[in-house]
Image: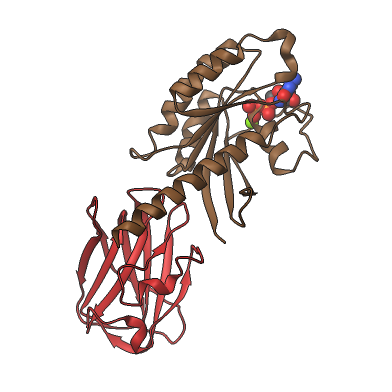
Chain colours: A red, B brown
Amino acid sequence: MLNTALSSFGAQVVLATSSDENHPPESMIDGNTETFWLSTGMFPQEFIIRFPDNMKISVISVHSFNVKRLRIEKSTQTDAEKFEVIAEKEFEQTEGNLQTNEISLDGSNATHLKFLILSGYDHFVSVHKVGIQA
Amino acid sequence: MVKLRARCILVGDAAVGKSALSQMFSSDGSHIQKNYSMTAGVELLVKSVNIPETSDSVELYIFDSAGRETFVETCEKMWGQPSVVCVVFEISSLDSFKSCSRWLERVRAHCNGLQLPGVLVGNKSDLASRREVETSVAQEWAQEQGLQYHETSAKEMENCDAPFLSLAQAFYALYQDRRQMIQRLG
Ligand SMILES: Nc1nc2c(ncn2[C@@H]2O[C@H](COP(=O)(O)OP(=O)(O)O)[C@@H](O)[C@H]2O)c(=O)[nH]1
Ligand SMILES: [Mg+2]
């Protein structure tokens, strides 16, 4: 399921702090690493993915570029509220190819995931794909 | 259409006209601070700049820092990770020009090695009769440092938008460059 487009089972990006109409937030959940969401300056940057149901999550995969510090929070509410931190990680810098990272969780449930990009290796960072494994 | 956001750090010695300049810019010249008042920390001004011939814009978050040494540390805490820098001196003070390299180093120290587009501004161009810094000298140093050079007069409302437009354009160019580079990765 890590390779399936999150959007194909009803996930949506309900908030993203940056927007370039050529690189909409949906690019992160279309399962395609060629399309991407690009931040448009300053940190932190944030986006929230909402799932149609309460999802059990054991692994989150992220394809990105120049993301440095990432914090992930989850909510189990119907609305995007009461987030709790579930992971924080510093990605390694890559050159000439995307960063690919997998973050293992304890298989807990979530209705929303919030991604906070706290810093970057450049002024602008991109997220190409977010996948999850139940 | 894209709206970029840039953290613009404004530095330079006390009384060179940083606050006057940024206020002139952020209020479209409709207001000038007449009475001199020392900025006691950091002031934040936000202004959106349209990029000519596009529907894109850059929102500048201008951090006006107090020039007095004792306040600088407080200011530095507010800088975060700078996107662009604006270093100001007054053309009627050689000392204020000499301080510019120190100001620039100070801001660069916060950049974690990131490229930092910037401008050098020679303010108080209305005081030409008391000029201590020749345009060519300032221009040359700016070029060495990779900065664009502009002369302004906040008092006469002369050319005050130019430095900020130039910063916005430089940041926009960086964005386009990175966008194309990332496009080739995916
Ligand atoms: N003649 C002249 N005076 C200026 C100009 N810009 C600012 N000033 C004056 O210089 C003094 C210091 O200005 P201010 O903006 O507070 O400087 P800052 O400490 O760098 O923020 C004030 O008295 C201003 O009125 C200018 O372009 N020409
Ligand atoms: Mg001031």
Query: Would you say A14 lies left or right of B149 here?
Result: left
Instruction: Name the quadrant containing residue B164.
Output: top right
Query: Would you say A58 lies left or right of B148 here?
Result: left
Image quarter where the C terminus of chain A lies is bottom left
**Ligand 1 position by quadrant:** top right
How many numbered marks appear? 0
Instruction: Name the quadrant containing residue B158.
Output: top right
Instruction: Name the quadrant containing residue A62.
Output: bottom left
Residue at image coords 68%, 32%: B21
Viewer-closest of A72 and B139? B139
Residue at image coords 33%, 38%: B113
Q: Position of residue B44 (x, y in %)?
A: 60, 44
* Residue lying farthest to the bottom in this orientation: A53
Q: Does residue A120 sit above or below B85 in this rendering?
A: below
Q: Position of residue B79 (x, y in %)?
A: 47, 41
Image quarter where the N terminus of chain A lies is bottom left
Query: Would you say A46 lies left or right of B93 here?
Result: left
Residue at image coords 24%, 52%: A96
Viewer-closest of A44 and A77? A44
Q: Position of residue A65 (x, y in %)?
A: 31, 57
Q: Position of residue A47 (x, y in %)?
A: 42, 69
Q: Does residue A83 sit above or below B83 in this rendering?
A: below
Residue at image coords 51%, 26%: B70
